[in-house]
């Protein structure tokens, strides 16, 4: 469903995983806290807010275990926030660096969502209804780490700023409410938007509260909502899941989030990449929101490719996705690919063509996708072509590349060979590439087809894959939840291959 301002219920189905919080990052104080107030050797109790102090690595000259502190923060338009701290014990208060005038601690609002009396706070979040304080605290640390990465490091708009606020620097800043609940209809997590306050709030089923693939995914929706421009734009609708999974995976795996993770005791964890979908069904429309058969949850490696930008295209790189939000033509209902055409002058056909060429080995700059590829490649579905005899092949009709999709065809060879390919009879514009990988060093090279053909000398310690993508010069205004016949029009072609076989 296209996100709307009134209620944005985005559902996520997700497998269960187990995550343990490192004891060194446990709670050591706060109003109502009855547990331990001393920290494991090598860590120090650090005040975070009136409800929460935490054991952080390192020593402090002023232990804070007897802390009783009240902190009041007031913010005035256009000025640095004034923070008044009254203490009854000697304290060390660490104030995380925050962009602009953002205060270190946001104001809670129990009227966003159902509220309740059981909650725990961190500077930017409030978790209601968790089954234990340790679960709430683990979730708060994870959420703070994600906030630190996306808002602090990557400069996304703070989800503490109202959707309705047009002058961001003066606040107000409100905590994001997360409700831990026993069940949700067919979902692990949901993001809602409160129209009156312009605030996102989240619901997550208890067992998923500390699972980043669910809770950071939902926060990803929240941050995306607070970036504003994709809201109520039907043609961005399915891409919301692509973005949220990109956020969750980047939080879990990316060097971009490494310092934010370590600041809050989070470890890098396994990638969410699903190669049986991304590579096995690469012929699909690049983002396809079709019920049951679509790829919109799995298509995020394209956003990772734009972010890691291994080909160095202009406008892309670390801020690529933020650029897609900020340069979205307001209320145009354009697709994100239309925005991409303005964000980078490389051209969408070239970017998409090279993305798929690199997916031959999941060589997109992502820290772990390439390793996952090597372990799973033998199980992926590569049955894309049918032989026509005389070294000629055509795509199976059900696997012709649809709009901005591709065929990825690993070739078999023996020893050192010259591989030549020639494409003819293409029914639509395409970008084709020979993707070549050194099997001992892992290094890759990419040879373009030009005028429909290419030839490459492939050494005995190299492997080669033919990749062809459906890349029309004119972008199509399509709704990924309701694919038009235009985007479902598959690229048919004939390819002659010598020196190797599919
Ligand atoms: C990957 O995607 C396929 C197809 O959508 C799905 O059947 C499978 O369960 C997914 N695998 C994982 C690990 O999520
Ligand atoms: C091959 O194509 C890519 C994009 O598809 C382009 O960036 C590169 O310059 C081309 N290389 C050559 C040698 O033409
Ligand atoms: C492949 O990598 C290995 C190890 O780095 C290197 O010795 C070899 O020369 C490379 N092969 C080619 C064809 O470049």
Image: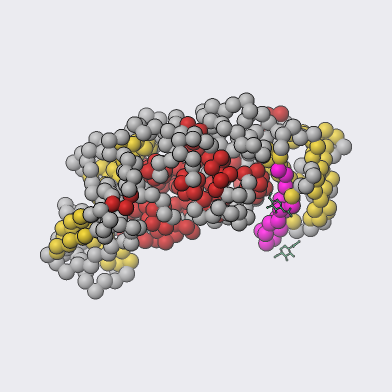
Question: Which image quarter holds the N terminus?
Answer: top left
Q: Is residue 446 magenta?
A: yes
Q: In the image shown, does 348 or 442 lie closer to the viewer? A: 348
Q: Residue furthest left?
A: 88
What residue is drawn where x is 53% and y is 52%?
307
User: Residue 382: horizontal and vertical position, in percent?
Assistant: 68, 39
Name the one closer to the observer, 355 or 47.
Answer: 355
Residue 19: x and y, percent? 39, 50
Quarter of the image where one finds residue 115: top left
Q: Is residue 301 left or right of residue 219?
A: right
- Residue drawn at (53%, 40%), measured in percent from left and top? 336
Question: Horizontal and vertical percent for residue 260?
Answer: 40, 58
Residue sitting at the far right = 390
Q: Give the magenta-colored segment's residue range.
A: 431-447
Report the residue at 37% width, 36% height from top: 190
Q: Nearer the viewer, residue 477 or 10?
A: 477
Is residue 444 among what the camera can see?
yes
Is residue 229 rendered magenta in the image?
Answer: no
- Residue found at x 17% / y 62%: 85
Magenta stretch: dominant SS?
strand
- Observer able to see residue 18: no
């Amino acid at each position: 469903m296209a996100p709307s301002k009134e209620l944005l219920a985005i559902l996520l189905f997700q497998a269960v995983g187990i995550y343990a919080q490192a004891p060194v990052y446990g709670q050591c104080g706060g109003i109502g806290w009855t547990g331990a107030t001393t920290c494991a050797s090598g860590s120090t109790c650090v005040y975070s807010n009136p409800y929460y102090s935490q054991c952080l690595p390192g020593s402090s000259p002023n232990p804070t275990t007897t802390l009783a502190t009240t902190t009041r923060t007031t913010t005035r338009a256009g000025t640095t926030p004034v923070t008044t701290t009254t203490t009854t014990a000697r304290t060390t208060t660490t104030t995380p660096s925050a962009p602009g005038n953002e205060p270190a601690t946001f104001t809670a609002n129990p009227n966003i969502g159902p509220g309740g009396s059981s909650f725990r706070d961190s500077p930017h979040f409030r978790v209601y209804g968790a089954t234990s304080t340790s679960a709430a605290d683990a979730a708060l640390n994870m959420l703070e780490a994600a906030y630190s990465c996306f808002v602090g490091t990557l400069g996304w708009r703070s989800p503490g700023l109202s959707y309705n606020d047009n002058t961001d620097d003066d606040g107000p800043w409100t905590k994001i409410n997360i409700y831990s609940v026993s069940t949700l209809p067919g979902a692990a997590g949901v993001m809602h938007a409160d129209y009156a306050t312009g605030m996102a709030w989240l619901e997550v089923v208890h067992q998923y509260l500390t699972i980043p693939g669910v809770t950071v995914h939902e926060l990803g929706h929240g941050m995306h909502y607070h970036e504003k421009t994709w809201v109520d734009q039907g043609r961005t609708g399915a891409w919301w899941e692509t973005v949220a999974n990109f956020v969750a995976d980047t939080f879990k795996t990316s060097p971009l989030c490494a310092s934010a993770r370590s600041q809050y005791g989070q470890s890098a964890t396994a990638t969410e990449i699903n190669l049986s979908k991304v590579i096995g069904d690469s012929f699909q429309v690049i983002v396809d929101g079709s019920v049951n058969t679509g790829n919109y949850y799995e298509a995020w490696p394209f956003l990772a490719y734009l972010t890691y930008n291994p080909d160095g295209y202009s406008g892309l790189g670390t801020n690529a996705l933020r650029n897609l939000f900020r340069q979205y033509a307001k209320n145009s209902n354009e697709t994100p690919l239309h925005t991409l055409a303005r964000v980078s002058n490389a051209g969408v056909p070239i970017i998409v063509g090279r993305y798929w060429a690199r997916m031959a080995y999941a060589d997109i700059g992502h820290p772990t996708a390439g390793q996952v590829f090597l372990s799973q490649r033998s199980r992926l579905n590569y049955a894309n072509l049918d032989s026509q005899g005389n070294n000629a092949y055509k795509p199976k009709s059900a696997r012709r590349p649809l709009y901005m999709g591709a065929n990825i065809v690993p070739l078999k060879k023996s020893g050192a060979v010259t591989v030549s390919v020639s494409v003819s009879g293409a029914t639509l514009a395409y970008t084709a590439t020979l993707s070549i990988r050194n099997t001992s060093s892992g290094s890759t090279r990419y040879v373009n087809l030009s005028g429909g053909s290419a030839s490459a000398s492939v050494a005995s310690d190299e492997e080669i894959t033919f990749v062809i993508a459906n890349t029309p010069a004119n972008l199509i205004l399509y709704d990924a939840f309701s694919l038009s016949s235009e985007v479902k029009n598959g690229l048919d072609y004939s390819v002659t291959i010598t020196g190797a076989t599919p």
